Amino acid sequence: MPPKRSNGGGGQGGSPSHPVVTTILLLGAIGWAFGLLFQKGMLAWPPTRLLSGMATIAGCLALVGPIILARSGKAGGSLGELIWMTGGLLIWIFNLVGVANGDLRSIDWATPLGPRAMGLIILAVMLAGLRSGLAGRDWSWTNVTGWALGLFWVGMAVATWTLAPAPGLTAGLASR
């Protein structure tokens, strides 16, 4: 006999019971990210600062992560959700500290931490989560989103070491 599906109040796979609100939050985050990129003059062709633009989009998605995950009502979570929650809370906390210090004009709302600091913190969360057994085979969209954000942040941290010019080297003909 096949198992019966419950018609409970919660959504599937970490999704909240109101997908319209979740969609509005996600579209609002992406819209705000593009608004920030437009305001900074970073929406141009060809995209010369593509990684910093992607970091802004990742930061805005991370900001809505704690709200979406808190609304899901799930008691336990996956490693991807932990990564998304950690990244979002880090950004919220650093923004609140900036507001408390009165630095409203100088706060970079989507990326208050540098890529190296954010990537290393998320790498620590990933390794601790892997070691504690949180990395299961959950393919919910919240888990996959968390993993995608986490791998992006760790990749950005690695890129700060590998893509940055060595000290003392010239940056080309413009510096001669």
Image (cartoon, rainbow, N blue to C red):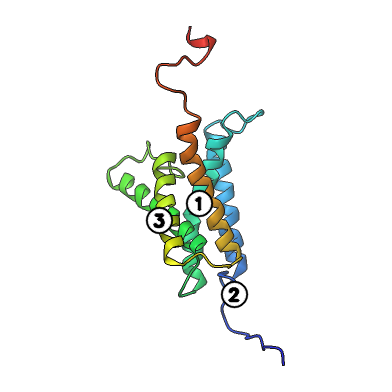
Please name the residue that numbered disc 2 is placed on.
11
**First of labels 1, 3 by sequence position:** 3
Say which residue appears at 38% left-offset and 40% top-offset: 107
Query: Where in the figure is residue 121, as x and y percent of width and height?
Result: 39, 49
**First of labels 1, 2 by sequence position:** 2
Please name the residue that numbered disc 1 is placed on.
150
Labels 1, 3: front one: 1
Give the secondary structure at mark 2: loop
Q: Residue furthest front?
A: 131
Instruction: Using the rendered image of the protein, determine whether residue 91 is visible from the camera's viewpoint.
Output: no
The image quadrant where one finds the N terminus is bottom right
Query: Where in the figure is residue 28, as x and y percent of width and height?
Result: 57, 53
Report how far apart the C-alphas of labels 1 and 3 lie in the structure.
Answer: 13 Å
Please name the residue that numbered disc 3 is placed on.
89
- Figure check: 133 above or below 165: below
Instruction: Using the rendered image of the protein, determine whether residue 83 is visible from the camera's viewpoint.
Output: yes
